[in-house]
Image (spheres, grey):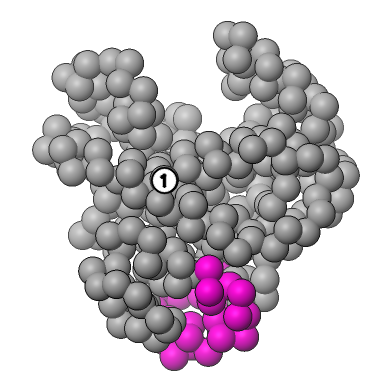
């Protein structure tokens, strides 16, 4: 089975709005003019409304009722608004996916994104870290769209105790990580983001720059810890020392500030779904 087969089976690759495609292209640049972002978003009234809903949904906004994209840019900064626009466009490309609980899926994606962004706070890569977390498991959606019956069966086997990382390569020749990275590549995201997504499970391997992959891997592990609490905090910190030490992070100190992000992820998930176009997709969405 080839990547082409996966992406063409049951329909073409989900399309992104032109505004979002243009802003993804701008991720390759060092800076984007605020006026350019505002002008672009005003061409898509629904997208603009959704982004403002995101901005107003949690403590992202330090003041209530941000009413315009220009005000959002002034409040949060150009890069942060660019990131929210891209995330809104990406989620809007997957309105109906068979056998996927969309609330759970997007809440987890957003939680990992917020944790990754917080871990990278104070660095130029903070907003890119948000996109890394947001997109890290999109391959699951692609596989469910292309092969809904097989994907649903693997999901049942996973609930019964089988490892999804083992099941998907057997069923599809690829796992969701590889598909997530390939989707990011086809949507023309920067190579560094594509590579980091592909290395999320084994961030210390490979020959490229490991920093973004380490951030993503750490965010995934921390989000799982914050949600599941299946391990002791000291055990978590010690077990991930080879991940957070190269990042020059004080993970024990950061953990105290990350818990509230889980509440933010639920609010952002609700805002993300608000106003989504209910266009038909293959199969039936599981809510």
Image side of residue 164 versus residue 144, left or right: left
Position of the N terminus, as image quadrant, is: top right
Residue 194 as seen in the image, left or right of residue 221: right
Above or below 35: residue 178 = above
Q: Position of residue 122 (x, y in %)?
A: 21, 60
- The number of discs equals 1
Asked if residue 43 is among those painted magenta in the image, a careful observer would answer yes
Q: Residues within 10 Å of mark 1 (few under 14, many from 20)?
A: many
From this viewpoint, which residue is outermost toward the top? 161
Of residue 106 and residue 234, the one placed in the foreground of this image is: 106
* Residue drawn where x is 25% and y is 73% of the image: 63
For the question of whether residue 275 can be seen, the reply is: yes
Label 1's element? helix
* In magenta segment, residue 10: no
Seen at 40% across and 81% down, the residue is 67
User: In the picture shown, does residue 145 fall above or below 188?
Assistant: above
Range drawn in magenta: 22-50
């Amino acid at each position: 089975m080839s990547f082409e087969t996966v992406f063409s089976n049951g329909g073409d690759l989900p399309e992104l709005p032109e505004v979002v495609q243009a802003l993804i292209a701008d991720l390759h640049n060092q800076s984007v003019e605020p006026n350019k972002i505002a002008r672009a978003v005003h061409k898509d009234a629904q997208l603009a409304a959704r982004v403002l809903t995101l901005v107003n949904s949690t403590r992202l906004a330090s003041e209530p009722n941000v009413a315009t994209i220009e005000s959002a840019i002034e409040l949060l900064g150009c890069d942060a608004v660019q990131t929210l626009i891209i995330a809104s466009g990406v989620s809007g490309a997957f309105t109906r996916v068979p056998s996927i609980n969309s609330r759970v899926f997007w809440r987890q994606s957003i939680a990992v994104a917020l944790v990754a962004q917080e871990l990278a706070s104070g660095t130029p890569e903070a907003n890119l870290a948000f996109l890394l977390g947001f997109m890290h498991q999109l391959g699951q959606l692609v596989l469910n769209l292309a092969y809904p019956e097989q994907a649903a069966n693997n999901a049942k086997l996973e609930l019964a105790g089988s490892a999804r990382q083992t099941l998907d390569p057997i069923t599809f020749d690829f796992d969701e990580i590889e598909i997530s990275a390939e989707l990011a590549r086809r949507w023309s995201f920067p190579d560094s983001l594509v590579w980091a997504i592909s290395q999320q499970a084994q961030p210390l391997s490979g020959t490229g720059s490991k920093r973004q992959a380490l951030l993503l891997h750490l965010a995934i592990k921390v989000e799982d810890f914050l949600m599941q609490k299946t391990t002791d905090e000291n055990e978590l910190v010690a077990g991930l020392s080879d991940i957070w030490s190269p990042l020059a992070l004080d993970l024990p100190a950061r953990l105290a500030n990350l818990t509230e992000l889980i509440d933010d992820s639920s609010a952002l998930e609700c805002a993300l779904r608000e106003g989504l176009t209910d266009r038909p997709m293959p199969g039936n969405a599981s809510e």
